[in-house]
Image: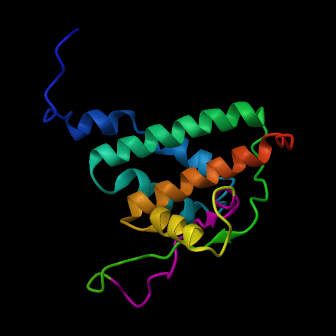
Amino acid sequence: MPPRPPHDRHLPSSAISRFVDTARIEALLAPYLPAPQERAFVVRCVLGEGPAHHRGANYVLLSLLGLVLERVAHGDREALDLGASQEVPMRLPPHLARPDDAPSYPLPLPSAPLELLARKGTRDFEAMVDCLTDGPPQHALANVAMVTLLADLLARLPESPEE
């Protein structure tokens, strides 16, 4: 077995930024965020903020979900009605908050996928929402974007037969 590289060895951020294609993610999110300025804001938060390894991971995971969605949708990328959603609050530290800040991000969290795991209104459901929407923008919005793509995928899949 070949020796494993040391854990403290990281690629330079330039190696990560080289493969991140913001236009690809903007196109992927276009059906859910039709306003170009809102879409650009979300993509900037997900791919342009935070540590390079988070930006790279967000790009890889969103791109892979996009490839799966493309195959399932067979090229039909019309936005589906994803049902009920939760606003995603902007949780800024008090010293960074400004009076003109929007109270929530432009991309809401679809509820349907979470309702497959816990009944809406329960503590478990609320805890799941909190886990997905808490943290810095690159985490919260990446999570919400991934759940949005998963909601679209689930909506396009045939219902499983009742057992």
**Front residue (pair 151, 105):** 151
Q: Identify the residue shown where x is 49% and y is 81%.
A: 102
* Dominant secondary-structure state across the stretch colored magenta: loop
Q: Name the quarter where the C terminus is drawn.
A: top right
Q: Identify the residue shown where x is 13% and y is 28%.
A: 6
Give coordinates of residue 68: x percent, y percent: 64, 34
Q: Identify the residue shown where x is 76% and y is 64%.
A: 83
- Start and end of the magenta stretch? 97-115
Taking the magenta stretch, the answer to whether it contains residue 107 is yes
Q: Name the quarter where the N terminus is drawn.
A: top left
| Residue 73 seen in the current view | yes
Q: Is residue 134 above or below residue 80?
A: below
Q: Is residue 51 above or below residue 140?
A: above
Give coordinates of residue 48: x percent, y percent: 36, 53
Q: Is residue 9 rendered to the left or right of residue 105? A: left
Name of the residue lying farthest toward the bottom: 99
Give coordinates of residue 122: x percent, y percent: 62, 73
Taking the magenta stretch, the answer to whether it contains residue 90 is no
